[in-house]
Image: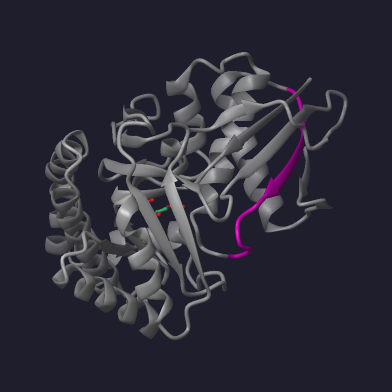
Amino acid sequence: MLKSALSHPNKALVIYWGNENDMLRTPTRSSLSVTLQGINHPLDYIVSLRTIGASEHDKIIIDGIEDKGEIRSHFIYHLNAMRRYTGFKEKLEVTTRTSFPVGSGLAGSAASASALAEAFAGLIGKTEDTRLKSIMARRGSGSASRSVFGGFVMWQKGNSDDSSYATQLFNENHWDLRNVIAMVSSTPKKIRSIEGMKLSKRTCPAEIYSEFVSVANHHIEGISTAVLERDIGKLGALYEKENYLFRQVCLKTTPPLDYWTKVTDNILNKVANLRNDGVPAYAGTDAGPNVHVFTQPNYVERVIRTIQEAEGILDIIHCRVGKGSHLIEEHLI
Ligand code: PMV
Protein backbone atom coordinates (compact mmCIF):
# COMPACT_ATOMS: atom_id res chain seq x y z
CA MET A 1 0.00 0.00 0.00
CA LEU A 2 1.18 3.53 -0.77
CA LYS A 3 0.04 6.90 0.64
CA SER A 4 1.44 10.41 0.20
CA ALA A 5 0.84 13.58 2.18
CA LEU A 6 1.74 17.25 1.98
CA SER A 7 2.17 19.60 4.91
CA HIS A 8 3.34 23.13 5.78
CA PRO A 9 5.22 24.70 8.68
CA ASN A 10 3.50 26.90 11.23
CA LYS A 11 4.54 29.96 13.22
CA ALA A 12 3.69 30.07 16.91
CA LEU A 13 1.99 33.23 18.16
CA VAL A 14 1.96 31.71 21.65
CA ILE A 15 5.11 29.63 21.86
CA TYR A 16 5.81 26.07 23.00
CA TRP A 17 9.14 25.80 24.81
CA GLY A 18 9.63 22.86 27.17
CA ASN A 19 8.07 19.51 27.95
CA GLU A 20 6.52 17.99 31.02
CA ASN A 21 7.40 14.62 29.51
CA ASP A 22 10.25 14.65 26.98
CA MET A 23 9.54 11.20 25.61
CA LEU A 24 5.83 11.88 24.98
CA ARG A 25 6.44 15.56 24.15
CA THR A 26 3.61 16.71 26.36
CA PRO A 27 4.40 20.42 26.84
CA THR A 28 4.60 22.68 29.87
CA ARG A 29 2.19 25.20 28.32
CA SER A 30 -0.51 25.31 25.66
CA SER A 31 0.33 27.16 22.42
CA LEU A 32 -1.32 28.78 19.41
CA SER A 33 -0.05 29.04 15.85
CA VAL A 34 -0.84 29.96 12.31
CA THR A 35 -0.14 27.51 9.49
CA LEU A 36 1.96 29.06 6.70
CA GLN A 37 1.70 28.61 2.95
CA GLY A 38 4.36 30.32 0.84
CA ILE A 39 3.24 32.76 -1.87
CA ASN A 40 6.54 33.65 -3.60
CA HIS A 41 8.19 30.39 -2.56
CA PRO A 42 6.41 27.10 -1.75
CA LEU A 43 6.88 25.86 1.81
CA ASP A 44 5.77 22.29 1.13
CA TYR A 45 6.93 19.06 2.66
CA ILE A 46 5.85 15.87 0.88
CA VAL A 47 6.11 12.34 2.27
CA SER A 48 5.31 9.08 0.51
CA LEU A 49 4.94 5.98 2.66
CA ARG A 50 4.93 2.45 1.27
CA THR A 51 4.51 -0.81 3.15
CA ILE A 52 7.42 -3.23 2.64
CA GLY A 53 5.94 -6.12 4.60
CA ALA A 54 8.69 -8.74 4.49
CA SER A 55 11.59 -6.36 5.13
CA GLU A 56 13.37 -6.28 8.44
CA HIS A 57 14.09 -2.56 8.39
CA ASP A 58 12.40 0.68 7.48
CA LYS A 59 14.00 2.50 4.55
CA ILE A 60 14.33 6.30 4.57
CA ILE A 61 15.01 8.26 1.35
CA ILE A 62 15.46 11.99 1.78
CA ASP A 63 15.39 14.07 -1.41
CA GLY A 64 16.46 11.06 -3.48
CA ILE A 65 19.25 9.79 -1.21
CA GLU A 66 18.93 6.90 1.22
CA ASP A 67 19.73 8.28 4.66
CA LYS A 68 21.68 6.20 7.17
CA GLY A 69 22.41 8.88 9.74
CA GLU A 70 20.68 11.12 12.24
CA ILE A 71 17.63 11.84 10.06
CA ARG A 72 17.04 8.13 9.59
CA SER A 73 17.15 7.55 13.38
CA HIS A 74 14.70 10.39 13.91
CA PHE A 75 12.22 9.06 11.31
CA ILE A 76 12.47 5.51 12.68
CA TYR A 77 11.94 6.75 16.23
CA HIS A 78 8.80 8.57 15.04
CA LEU A 79 7.53 5.59 13.01
CA ASN A 80 8.04 3.29 16.01
CA ALA A 81 6.12 5.66 18.28
CA MET A 82 3.20 5.71 15.79
CA ARG A 83 3.31 1.92 15.38
CA ARG A 84 3.21 1.42 19.16
CA TYR A 85 0.34 3.88 19.52
CA THR A 86 -1.80 2.26 16.80
CA GLY A 87 -0.72 -1.40 16.82
CA PHE A 88 0.36 -1.22 13.14
CA LYS A 89 3.19 -3.69 12.55
CA GLU A 90 4.55 -3.39 9.03
CA LYS A 91 7.91 -1.98 8.00
CA LEU A 92 7.82 1.08 5.79
CA GLU A 93 9.69 2.88 3.05
CA VAL A 94 9.64 6.65 3.57
CA THR A 95 10.46 9.01 0.70
CA THR A 96 10.44 12.76 1.23
CA ARG A 97 10.75 15.91 -0.83
CA THR A 98 11.00 19.39 0.54
CA SER A 99 10.70 22.76 -1.14
CA PHE A 100 12.10 24.69 1.82
CA PRO A 101 15.24 26.72 1.45
CA VAL A 102 17.87 24.25 2.67
CA GLY A 103 18.74 24.49 6.39
CA SER A 104 16.54 27.54 6.69
CA GLY A 105 15.40 26.95 10.26
CA LEU A 106 11.83 27.43 9.03
CA ALA A 107 10.17 24.89 11.31
CA GLY A 108 10.76 22.14 8.77
CA SER A 109 10.30 19.61 11.58
CA ALA A 110 6.66 20.67 12.04
CA ALA A 111 5.98 20.17 8.33
CA SER A 112 7.87 16.88 8.04
CA ALA A 113 6.50 15.19 11.17
CA SER A 114 2.91 16.22 10.35
CA ALA A 115 3.28 15.01 6.75
CA LEU A 116 4.58 11.68 8.05
CA ALA A 117 1.69 11.37 10.54
CA GLU A 118 -0.83 12.28 7.83
CA ALA A 119 0.52 9.64 5.41
CA PHE A 120 0.65 7.07 8.24
CA ALA A 121 -2.99 7.84 9.16
CA GLY A 122 -3.83 7.32 5.47
CA LEU A 123 -2.21 3.86 5.53
CA ILE A 124 -4.23 2.75 8.55
CA GLY A 125 -7.50 4.25 7.28
CA LYS A 126 -7.69 7.00 9.94
CA THR A 127 -7.54 10.13 7.79
CA GLU A 128 -10.67 11.58 9.40
CA ASP A 129 -9.32 11.17 12.95
CA THR A 130 -7.72 14.59 13.46
CA ARG A 131 -7.09 13.99 17.16
CA LEU A 132 -5.11 10.82 16.41
CA LYS A 133 -3.15 12.58 13.65
CA SER A 134 -2.24 15.46 15.95
CA ILE A 135 -1.10 13.09 18.72
CA MET A 136 0.98 11.07 16.24
CA ALA A 137 2.52 14.22 14.73
CA ARG A 138 3.39 15.50 18.21
CA ARG A 139 5.47 12.40 18.88
CA GLY A 140 7.79 13.39 16.02
CA SER A 141 8.00 17.12 16.81
CA GLY A 142 5.89 19.07 19.30
CA SER A 143 4.98 21.88 16.94
CA ALA A 144 3.95 19.33 14.27
CA SER A 145 0.81 18.60 16.32
CA ARG A 146 -0.43 22.00 15.06
CA SER A 147 0.45 21.64 11.31
CA VAL A 148 -2.16 18.88 11.01
CA PHE A 149 -4.63 21.78 10.80
CA GLY A 150 -4.85 24.82 8.59
CA GLY A 151 -5.64 28.31 9.78
CA PHE A 152 -5.29 29.30 13.43
CA VAL A 153 -4.59 26.36 15.67
CA MET A 154 -4.38 25.76 19.40
CA TRP A 155 -2.42 22.93 20.98
CA GLN A 156 -4.02 22.10 24.33
CA LYS A 157 -1.19 20.95 26.57
CA GLY A 158 -3.23 18.22 28.28
CA ASN A 159 -1.62 16.05 30.91
CA SER A 160 -1.17 12.73 29.14
CA ASP A 161 -0.40 11.23 25.72
CA ASP A 162 -4.13 11.03 24.91
CA SER A 163 -5.09 14.51 26.08
CA SER A 164 -2.30 16.57 24.47
CA TYR A 165 -3.34 17.48 20.93
CA ALA A 166 -4.24 20.44 18.74
CA THR A 167 -7.56 21.68 17.39
CA GLN A 168 -8.45 24.29 14.79
CA LEU A 169 -9.79 27.61 16.10
CA PHE A 170 -10.40 29.30 12.71
CA ASN A 171 -9.78 27.93 9.24
CA GLU A 172 -7.44 29.41 6.62
CA ASN A 173 -10.22 31.48 5.02
CA HIS A 174 -11.19 33.33 8.18
CA TRP A 175 -8.66 36.14 7.89
CA ASP A 176 -6.16 37.07 5.17
CA LEU A 177 -3.28 37.71 7.57
CA ARG A 178 0.19 37.77 5.99
CA ASN A 179 3.56 36.70 7.31
CA VAL A 180 6.73 38.11 5.76
CA ILE A 181 9.75 36.06 6.77
CA ALA A 182 13.13 37.76 6.71
CA MET A 183 15.68 35.00 6.23
CA VAL A 184 18.80 35.94 8.09
CA SER A 185 20.70 32.70 8.26
CA SER A 186 20.74 29.44 6.35
CA THR A 187 23.07 27.56 8.67
CA PRO A 188 21.49 25.01 11.05
CA LYS A 189 21.19 26.22 14.66
CA LYS A 190 23.94 25.33 17.10
CA ILE A 191 21.48 23.97 19.67
CA ARG A 192 18.39 22.18 18.35
CA SER A 193 15.04 23.28 19.77
CA ILE A 194 14.48 20.03 21.63
CA GLU A 195 17.83 20.41 23.43
CA GLY A 196 17.40 24.16 23.96
CA MET A 197 14.02 23.78 25.61
CA LYS A 198 15.32 21.04 27.92
CA LEU A 199 18.12 23.38 29.00
CA SER A 200 15.67 26.25 29.60
CA LYS A 201 13.37 24.13 31.71
CA ARG A 202 16.30 22.93 33.80
CA THR A 203 18.29 26.12 34.22
CA CYS A 204 16.10 29.18 33.65
CA PRO A 205 15.32 30.82 37.02
CA ALA A 206 12.00 29.46 38.30
CA GLU A 207 10.30 32.86 38.56
CA ILE A 208 10.95 33.60 34.87
CA TYR A 209 10.06 30.18 33.51
CA SER A 210 6.93 29.83 35.66
CA GLU A 211 5.73 33.30 34.61
CA PHE A 212 6.24 32.20 30.98
CA VAL A 213 4.21 29.03 31.65
CA SER A 214 1.43 30.63 33.66
CA VAL A 215 0.68 33.49 31.25
CA ALA A 216 0.09 31.18 28.24
CA ASN A 217 -3.66 30.67 28.65
CA HIS A 218 -4.20 34.39 29.09
CA HIS A 219 -2.26 35.09 25.87
CA ILE A 220 -4.15 32.36 24.02
CA GLU A 221 -7.44 33.89 25.08
CA GLY A 222 -6.32 37.37 23.95
CA ILE A 223 -4.95 36.20 20.60
CA SER A 224 -8.06 34.06 19.92
CA THR A 225 -10.23 37.15 20.44
CA ALA A 226 -7.92 39.22 18.21
CA VAL A 227 -8.19 36.60 15.45
CA LEU A 228 -11.97 36.38 15.87
CA GLU A 229 -12.20 40.18 15.52
CA ARG A 230 -9.47 40.31 12.84
CA ASP A 231 -7.77 42.91 14.98
CA ILE A 232 -4.10 43.11 13.93
CA GLY A 233 -3.19 45.66 16.62
CA LYS A 234 -4.41 43.40 19.42
CA LEU A 235 -2.81 40.33 17.86
CA GLY A 236 0.48 42.09 17.21
CA ALA A 237 0.85 43.49 20.72
CA LEU A 238 0.40 40.05 22.30
CA TYR A 239 2.62 38.37 19.69
CA GLU A 240 5.46 40.78 20.47
CA LYS A 241 4.90 40.34 24.22
CA GLU A 242 5.18 36.56 23.82
CA ASN A 243 8.31 37.01 21.77
CA TYR A 244 9.84 39.21 24.49
CA LEU A 245 9.03 36.65 27.21
CA PHE A 246 10.45 33.81 25.11
CA ARG A 247 13.62 35.86 24.55
CA GLN A 248 13.98 36.41 28.31
CA VAL A 249 13.61 32.67 28.97
CA CYS A 250 16.29 31.91 26.36
CA LEU A 251 18.73 34.55 27.62
CA LYS A 252 18.33 33.44 31.26
CA THR A 253 19.05 29.83 30.31
CA THR A 254 22.53 28.53 31.17
CA PRO A 255 24.39 28.73 28.89
CA PRO A 256 22.33 31.58 27.39
CA LEU A 257 20.48 30.73 24.18
CA ASP A 258 21.06 33.80 22.08
CA TYR A 259 19.50 32.92 18.75
CA TRP A 260 19.59 36.44 17.32
CA THR A 261 22.23 38.11 15.17
CA LYS A 262 22.89 41.80 14.46
CA VAL A 263 20.73 41.46 11.34
CA THR A 264 17.84 40.15 13.48
CA ASP A 265 18.13 43.19 15.75
CA ASN A 266 18.30 45.54 12.78
CA ILE A 267 15.12 44.11 11.22
CA LEU A 268 13.23 44.23 14.53
CA ASN A 269 14.14 47.93 14.81
CA LYS A 270 13.05 48.61 11.25
CA VAL A 271 9.65 47.01 11.94
CA ALA A 272 9.24 49.08 15.13
CA ASN A 273 9.98 52.21 13.07
CA LEU A 274 7.46 51.18 10.42
CA ARG A 275 4.87 50.98 13.17
CA ASN A 276 5.72 54.48 14.30
CA ASP A 277 4.85 55.48 10.74
CA GLY A 278 1.42 53.90 11.13
CA VAL A 279 2.09 50.57 9.40
CA PRO A 280 0.47 47.61 11.18
CA ALA A 281 3.51 45.31 11.22
CA TYR A 282 4.57 43.18 14.19
CA ALA A 283 7.78 41.19 14.45
CA GLY A 284 8.95 38.15 16.34
CA THR A 285 11.35 35.23 16.05
CA ASP A 286 11.52 31.53 16.72
CA ALA A 287 14.46 29.58 18.09
CA GLY A 288 16.64 31.14 15.40
CA PRO A 289 17.63 34.48 13.85
CA ASN A 290 14.94 34.69 11.14
CA VAL A 291 12.24 37.31 11.69
CA HIS A 292 8.51 36.70 11.14
CA VAL A 293 6.57 39.90 10.46
CA PHE A 294 2.78 39.75 10.63
CA THR A 295 0.91 42.35 8.61
CA GLN A 296 -2.08 42.94 6.32
CA PRO A 297 -2.05 42.34 2.52
CA ASN A 298 -2.02 46.03 1.56
CA TYR A 299 1.12 46.66 3.65
CA VAL A 300 3.16 43.66 2.45
CA GLU A 301 4.98 45.61 -0.27
CA ARG A 302 6.01 48.35 2.15
CA VAL A 303 7.18 45.79 4.74
CA ILE A 304 9.24 43.92 2.13
CA ARG A 305 10.78 47.15 0.81
CA THR A 306 11.80 48.17 4.32
CA ILE A 307 13.33 44.92 5.46
CA GLN A 308 15.13 44.46 2.14
CA GLU A 309 17.26 47.45 3.13
CA ALA A 310 18.77 45.51 6.02
CA GLU A 311 22.31 44.49 5.25
CA GLY A 312 22.93 40.73 5.48
CA ILE A 313 19.42 39.60 4.64
CA LEU A 314 19.43 36.41 2.53
CA ASP A 315 15.89 36.05 1.28
CA ILE A 316 12.31 37.12 1.94
CA ILE A 317 9.42 34.69 1.98
CA HIS A 318 5.89 36.00 1.81
CA CYS A 319 3.22 33.69 3.28
CA ARG A 320 -0.50 33.52 3.66
CA VAL A 321 -2.48 31.44 6.13
CA GLY A 322 -2.16 27.86 4.93
CA LYS A 323 -4.04 24.58 4.88
CA GLY A 324 -3.39 21.67 7.19
CA SER A 325 -1.67 18.42 6.23
CA HIS A 326 -3.58 16.37 3.66
CA LEU A 327 -3.23 13.32 1.45
CA ILE A 328 -2.21 13.87 -2.18
CA GLU A 329 -2.30 11.68 -5.27
CA GLU A 330 1.19 12.62 -6.46
CA HIS A 331 3.48 9.88 -5.12
CA LEU A 332 7.25 10.17 -4.84
CA ILE A 333 7.80 6.42 -5.20
O1 PMV B 1 8.50 21.21 17.57
P1 PMV B 1 9.94 21.47 17.90
O2 PMV B 1 10.48 20.42 18.80
O3 PMV B 1 10.74 21.64 16.65
O4 PMV B 1 10.01 22.86 18.70
C1 PMV B 1 9.66 24.06 18.13
C2 PMV B 1 9.58 25.14 19.12
C3 PMV B 1 9.36 26.55 18.59
O5 PMV B 1 9.27 26.56 17.18
C4 PMV B 1 10.54 27.42 18.97
C5 PMV B 1 8.13 27.17 19.20
C6 PMV B 1 6.80 26.67 18.69
O6 PMV B 1 5.84 26.70 19.49
O7 PMV B 1 6.68 26.33 17.51
State the quadrant of the C terminus. top right
- Residue 108 part of the magenta-drawn span: no
What residue is rendered at 45% in x and 22% in y? Answer: 130
How far from the left and from the top, in percent, is residue 186?
56, 72
Q: Residue at x 52, y 43 (%)?
A: 8
Q: Give me the residue at 36% from left, 43% from top.
A: 34
Highlighted range, magenta: 90-103
In this view, the residue in front, 196 or 323, is 323
Q: Can residue 15 be seen here?
A: no
With 236 as the anchor, is 49 left or right in this view?
right
94, 197: nearer the viewer: 94
Percent x, y for residue 199?
A: 36, 64
Q: Is residue 58 above or below residue 208?
A: above
Quadrant position of residue 41? bottom right
Q: Estimate the x, y position of residue 228 in percent, counting from the top left.
A: 19, 33
Q: Is residue 174 above or below residue 37?
A: above
Q: Is residue 301 left or right of residue 4?
A: left
Location of residue 14 with respect to 92 vertically, above or below: below
206 relative to 96 in the view: left or right:
left
Residue at 64 percent of width and 35 percent of height = 79
The answer to whether 80 appears left or right of 271 in the picture is right
Q: Residue 303: image x %, image y %?
A: 34, 66
